[in-house]
Each structure stands twice: as C-alpha cells, then as structure tokens.
Amino acid sequence: MTIAVRWQQITARVAAACARAGRAAADVTIVAVSKTHPADAIRAAALAGATDFGENYAQELVAKAAELAAGASPPAIRWHFIGRLQRNKARLIAGRVALVHAVDSVELAEELGKRAGGAVQPILLAVNLGGEATKGGVTADTAPAIARALVAVPGVSLDGLMTMPPPADDPEASRPHFAGLRTLRDRLQDDLGRALPVLSMGMSHDFEVAIEEGATLVRVGTALFGSRTYP
C-alpha cells in the first residue's frame, strides 16, 4: 500500500472521529511522525497532502530539513519536535520548528527561548499521566506550578499540553488519560487566565479515541509510513 493511499485512509478516519465527536475535521492536525524514515518518504507524504511532520532526534530533523530544502520543488513543511529534547540540543531546534511538543522543565524552556534568535518558540508542556518512570513529563500535581513558570519565560509561548499514555492493545485504555489531559488543560486555562488551545495526544493505534476526547494534534507514524527499521 502506498503512502498516498495510507494518507487518504488516515484522513478519512480522522474525519469520521471528528464527526462522532461533533467537531470539524479542520480542527485536528495530523503530525506525520517521520523518525527513521527517509526524506523520500516525507516527500511522498507531502505530495499526498501532509503538511506537518514530527521528528524525535534533533540532528535527524536538521539533516532531513536540509535535504528536502535542497531538492527540486521543496515541499512546504511545518516541522514538529516530538521527542525528549536535551538542553544542549535546543540550539538545533529553537526557532526552526513550528512546535516543541515535550517540554517538561523550566530550564529547557529557558534554553529554547535563548536560542530562538529573537523569535518566539511555541511549546507544549509534557504531562506524564501514566506515572511511567521511563517517560519524561511532569505530573498532574506539579503541572500548574510549572505552567505558571513557563508562561513567564521570555522567547517561548506555552500553547497547550501533550501526553503519551502507557502502551495498551486496546485503544479504549488510553481514553482516561486523554480525558484527564483535557480536564487538566481546562483547569490550567482558568488558573493562568489564558487559552491553551493545543492538545497533542493520540498515535497510530488510538488517535480516534484521542480526537473524541479533544485532541487537536495527533501523531501518526506507523499507520502512514509502515513499521520502522532501526540501524
């Protein structure tokens, strides 16, 4: 099955999930998770209609962006950094991506703000609602204080929250985590007195449930590009 056909299937599933939730399909952005996949695959997805692409590794993102920009008719791409970002790699990302999805410390936000080159870098606060020790992210209890600190950091804009539930075969197992992130976002909006419009949640196996619970960004990799191969 080609990337173009998979993209059509994914967009149809997004539209159906939005219809069930009484939402407009335009309210949900699909971030094509292209980590480990070559630039040619990204170009094929862009030709099929994808506009937003997510990478987990700073150097890989920079290299692919340069390769695609150097080609004939470079595709119009909005890059997202979706992995855990080390502070010493912030200089590679700040000011170059539409959104950094997984900020979980004030120190990282400060580094991004310093390295944004006078621009304002949009960020999301990563929340670890599953309590998994192997994943980054703040807890629901510490999120309010950290969010208050993030909105005061120069050079960044806190636009919302992201989460990644514990792995589960049943997509419904993710629903409480998605609903919990939406509830937390609503509380933080009241606490901060400002809008936090972005909810980044849901991946290839559970993005429809995430949309039903309010996701505005879904991260889809395997369903679009197929299984990853690691060196």
Image (tube, rainbow, N blue to C red):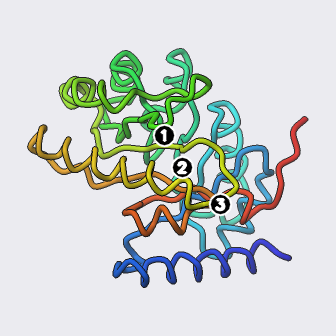
Q: CA distance from mark 3 to mark 2?
A: 18 Å
Residue occupied by mark 3 = 204
| Residue lying at 50% horizontally and 17% vertically, measured from the top left | 87
- Give the camera-side residue of 145 and 43: 145
What residue would you read off at disc 1?
96
* Residue at 38% from the left image edge and 77% from the top image edge: 21
Q: Give the SS element for disc 3.
A: loop
Q: Is residue 20 above or below residue 227?
A: below
Q: Quadrant of the C terminus?
A: top right
Give 18 or 167, whichever is nearer the viewer: 167
Foreground mark, 3 or 2?
3
Q: Which mark is residue 37?
A: none
Mark 3 nearby-residue class (10 Å; few <14, some 14–19, many ≥20) = some
Q: Is residue 58 left or right of residue 216?
A: right
The residue at 34%/33% (across/down) is 140
Q: Nearer the viewer, residue 28 or 130?
A: 130
32 w.r.t. 135: above or below: below
Residue neighbourhood size for the residue with mark 2, other residues' Cα within 10 Å, grouped as few (<14), some (14–19), many (≥20): many
User: What is the crowding at mark 1: few (fewer than 14 residues within 10 Å), some, or many (at least 20)?
Assistant: many
Residue 167 lies, in percent from the top left, at 65, 45
Whether residues under marks 2 and 1 lie with C-beta atoms below 8 angstroms apart, the answer is yes
Write down the residue under mark 2. 79
